[in-house]
Image: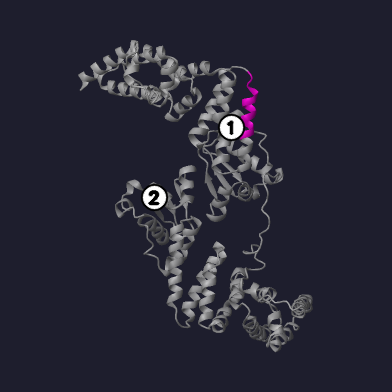
Amino acid sequence: MDFGRRLRESPSHNNLKLNTNDGGEVWASSVILSFNSHVIDHMTTTLHMTSVDMLEFSEAAVQMFVDSAYSGTAEGINREIFRDINKMANIFEVAWLVSKCSEYFTGLVNSVTSGSYTELFFLFEEAGFVYENLKMKDFLNTSVKKIESLKWKQQFLDKYLENAERFSTKKLDTVIELAGSDVNIVVQTLVNQLSEMFRIQGPSLPVYCKYLLDNSELHLCQKANNRDLFNELFDILKELPSSESKWTLGLYRKCTEKTLSGYDNTTEVTSFTGKGSGLEFGARMAPRVKVPMDFGRQLRESPSHNNLKLNTNEGKEVLASSVILSFNSPVIDHMTTTLHMTSVDMLEFSEAAVQMFVDSAYSGTAEGINREIFRDMNKMANVFEVAWLVSKCSDYFTELTNSVTSGSYAELFFLFEEAAFVHENLKMKDFLNTTVKKIESLKWKKQFLDKYLENAERFSTKKLDTVIELAGSDVDIVVQTLVNQLSEMFRIQGPSLPVYCKYLLDNSELHICQENNGALFNELFDVLRELPNEQLRWTLDLHRQSTAKMLKPEQDARVYCGTRGYVTLITKLMSDLAVVI
């Protein structure tokens, strides 16, 4: 979506600071970035972060990323910032921008129509970066197909491997991927390099050569028309010191066994995913650590492991291992593993609660939960998506509820306040439903609401919703309380309707009171008709809505208006309303 340059250029909207790798800052609207990225949405809306470290990226790239979010286009992408833009699009999960980056790369690939090492080097390097850092092979597959279509595999690899001693294992994996079944290309290059090296420096095997030989399908070279090349390779390797003889023999035997057994891995080679890298995409990954787990007190008490700083609401810091917290929380895993954050603001929570949260992650238990920190613990468990701890908090709340066996306002007040907080802040009704059932089972609804509503003027609309939820079909309890409160208020202060009273009356099912307790319903409107003239239209609408809900479809409202008490009230309201009009 194009949000317009006007918003982009107005500093009043820019409430989110993005810190770049050159010490610069880029400001943007957290709302607009959240519309584009659910990762940033979570960081700002749920975690209330006002600053995001983007220290891997240049100011120009971050500026372009923000401009793209505002404009809904990626027209400014160029070769210089493509790598940064593509990585940001992926780690912040901006799906449409990921797609645009893919289209840009495909366009670059399609523009190469003849063998050019410079052009193919750029494509292959970008594809290798994406494979190594984002664990995605699409760009690599596209680049390999382009080099193969140009019949430039031999020329490219000959030159590319000149600098192989500086390659990471992931980059060497991309070499193996490109070579595919043409293993002889890699073998010939290594034979040439090793012959020269051994002649000048003596027989010593570089790490990159060992990795390529260990992970290439050498048996394809041995069994094809390149057996002379295969033998030439091992003629060179046998010059290695005796300490390497066991490795050389093992390599030769592995190749020979595959050749003699008729092993053919050409299909697997074309989908090769990087052996020895620890993460083999396409292969089954090692099982994740299953939490909750007891990682041991020794790890908790060793400061050398605590690389993640958690900032609390008292200005204090709690240190923890990012790895152990990541095992427990996919949110913290994303923040540390993908976004490389070393500090997390937990400014809504007390130091004691954050300390307990960390201790629970280490111990795999929630035994230290108590009433004082329960609210913070439950909210942290939910916002950081620690599933097992969410369950433990739910169990704790259920146990508290079950422990209340008789009417006690203090006990029920605690339960109801916690349930209301969860409903208001986490949009979950489970605790509220449990609490309502407990109050109903104790037959304490009236006593509780009479006292609870004494402070209703300070309630948010969400908290008033919980009152309505508790009242349920017993609307007369709320109505009686409001009648008492309004009568006293009007007597002392004069007729003026508080906001909370209006909200409760607008959102309660008054027709149930009208039907079950007509006298109380009439008493309410007797009080309301004392309101100033400008509020009588609302009063009339409220009465009409209640009556309309109570009537059966075939009944006429005039019948009800003719019953004792109603006609007098309606006449009075209409008369007063005429004065207003």
On the image, the x and y values in percent for residue 181 come to 63, 79
Density class for disc 1 (Cα within 10 Å; few <14, some 14-19, many ≥20) is some
Which quadrant would residue 179 be assigned to in this image?
bottom right
Estimate the spatial distance between the alpha carbons at disc 2 and disc 1, rounded to whole Å: 34 Å
Q: What residue does disc 2 label?
A: 32
Residue sitting at 35 percent across and 13 percent down? 563
* In magenta segment, residue 216: no
Which quadrant would residue 350 be assigned to in this image?
top right
Closer mark to the observer between disc 2 and disc 1: 2
Residue sitting at 21 percent across and 21 percent down? 580
Magenta residues (range): 394-405
| Prevailing secondary structure of the magenta residues | helix
The N terminus, quarter of image: bottom left
Q: Is residue 184 above or below residue 77?
A: below
- In the rendered structure, find residue 373 and report the number of the disc placed on it: 1
The residue type indicated by label 1 comes to Ile
The C terminus, quarter of image: top left
* In magenta segment, residue 397: yes
